[in-house]
Image (cartoon, rainbow, N blue to C red):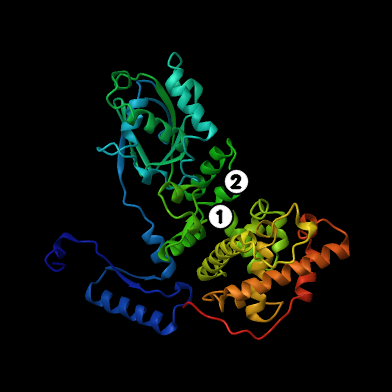
Amino acid sequence: MYLKLASKHPSIEITYVYASKGDVSAINPKVYNQSEVLKENTVRCFSGAKVNVSFVGARELIDSSRLEKSYTLQLKFIENYISRGEDNYVILASLKDYYTFVTYDNNELRTYIFAFNVRDYQGSNVEVNKDIKNTLELDKKLDFWWLNNGITILSSRASVAGKTISLDDVQVVNGLQTTNTIYHYIKNRENDNKVLKEERAILIKIVVTNDPETRDRVIKATNFQTPIPPASLKATDPIQLDIENFFLSHEWFYDRRKNYYKNTGKALDRIISIPYLAQSVIAIVFHEPDIARSRPSSILKKDNDYKRVFSQRISLEVYLFCAKTMKKLESFIRGVTSSKSSNLPINENWKHASPIRILIFHLGMLLVVKILNKTDYKPKDVETIKGIDFSDELMNTTLYELIQLTNNYVKLKELPINIGIKQKDFVTYILEHITLNNLNHKSTE
């Protein structure tokens, strides 16, 4: 075909893709040299052709798997709209037309358009959603958009024809609560003539961009207007997606978008939030349970702290190990402390404190200390025990010893338990006095 087209002076480009689970930053020189030979041989066969060799490794395969199929949705709007250049729009759409825009033909919600949202639907009992619902049901004399902050949409491309705007790769990055409330309001009244004739409108801001940095800035800015935990604003980071996918492959559920897995009916004892995982890693991997206990919300506020906890240097297996360990300890301590036959050395100082609430992160750290048989372990050491299944006997004896050490420390320092266990000195004290033994342990791998 190339020869037959020669008289047309064709332009030809040939690309070879070498895909593996390797690391493209560490390609073996022999492999690279072979790729150069391949390019030279191909050019000899196709004079003037542009020849490329592309290496695809594990990281690139993961990124490719996340690319959503391009799609276009159309939204009807009320006649007047504002456009700044060709890239951004502010429109008013009727509630009914917006409902059609965010649903399939079977009236089910298009959940994929909320992938970049930092949290999932919080439920109809949350105060803000109650207010939106009341506005829809009761304030019909005032237009809805007067009483609502509206919707923010990201799109890779937009075009207007008449009173319809076509949007590629739609993502609702702010307004998920409003969208869900409108969805339930209209869906539950599909046969109501008043709803079918609904003339109220909603304000929609449309930002057209393909730049990831711009996208993240819009997400952060629009979500700062309502109370959002700092961890939620990190929900779209690649490492958060990596952890979520890895957890899913082991039938655990990383709540990257708050309430997403709860809303889909997953078991609560297998759902792990971003802040809780961060606390678990700080306590178990970096043996800093005092920080996990005393400053849980501030762990992720500073970029340096966040990058230390969520780092490519920590394997995904370790994240899952930390989550499973803490969930198992929750169940174990709950059973022990509620048992009438419990022999834990809890004295009068514990009247206003609960071991499950205040010592669980310290216990997680000490179990790792016991298994590794050393108090100065490194993050890499934790990876060697990622398949451990802690026995009830080990958890019971370690908890008993931890409570005894707690009693001794607060007596020595003359401090209330709730204050004493939050100190760095307390961690130093228990690490210096914990009993180390050569232990046999069971692996679940």
* Left or right placement of residue 261 versus residue 166 in this view: right
Expressed as whole percent of the image width and height from the top left, the position of residue 224 reads 59, 39
* Left or right placement of residue 329 versus residue 294 in this view: left
Image point 40% across, 79% down: which residue?
32
Image point 34% across, 30% down: which residue?
188
Residue at far front of view: 341
Expressed as whole percent of the image width and height from the top left, the position of residue 106 reads 25, 38
**In front of the other: 437 or 121:** 437
Above or below, 177 relative to 146:
below
One can see residue 149 in this view: no
**In front of the other: 211 or 74:** 74
Q: Give the residue at mark 2.
A: 229
Q: Quadrant of residue 127?
A: top right
Residue 274 shows which numbered tag? 1
Q: Amino acid at mark 1?
A: Ile
Q: Quadrant of residue 50?
A: bottom left
**In front of the other: 330 or 98:** 330
Disc 2 crowd, CA 10 A, few/some/many (<14, 14-19, 20+):
some
Task: Please tell me whether mark 1 sits on a helix, a strand or a loop.
Answer: helix
Q: Amino acid at mark 2?
A: Pro
Task: Please tell me whether mark 2 sits on a helix, a strand or a loop.
Answer: loop
Residue 17 shows which numbered tag? none
Disc 1 crowd, CA 10 A, few/some/many (<14, 14-19, 20+):
many
* Left or right placement of residue 189 versus residue 445 in this view: left
Quarter of the image for the N terminus: give it.
bottom left
Residue contact between numbered discs 1 and 2, judged by CB atoms under 8 Å: yes
**In front of the other: 125 or 319:** 125
Expressed as whole percent of the image width and height from the top left, the position of residue 47 reads 24, 72
Q: CA–CA distance between discs 1 and 2?
A: 10 Å
Above or below, 409 relative to 371:
above
One can see residue 200 in this view: yes
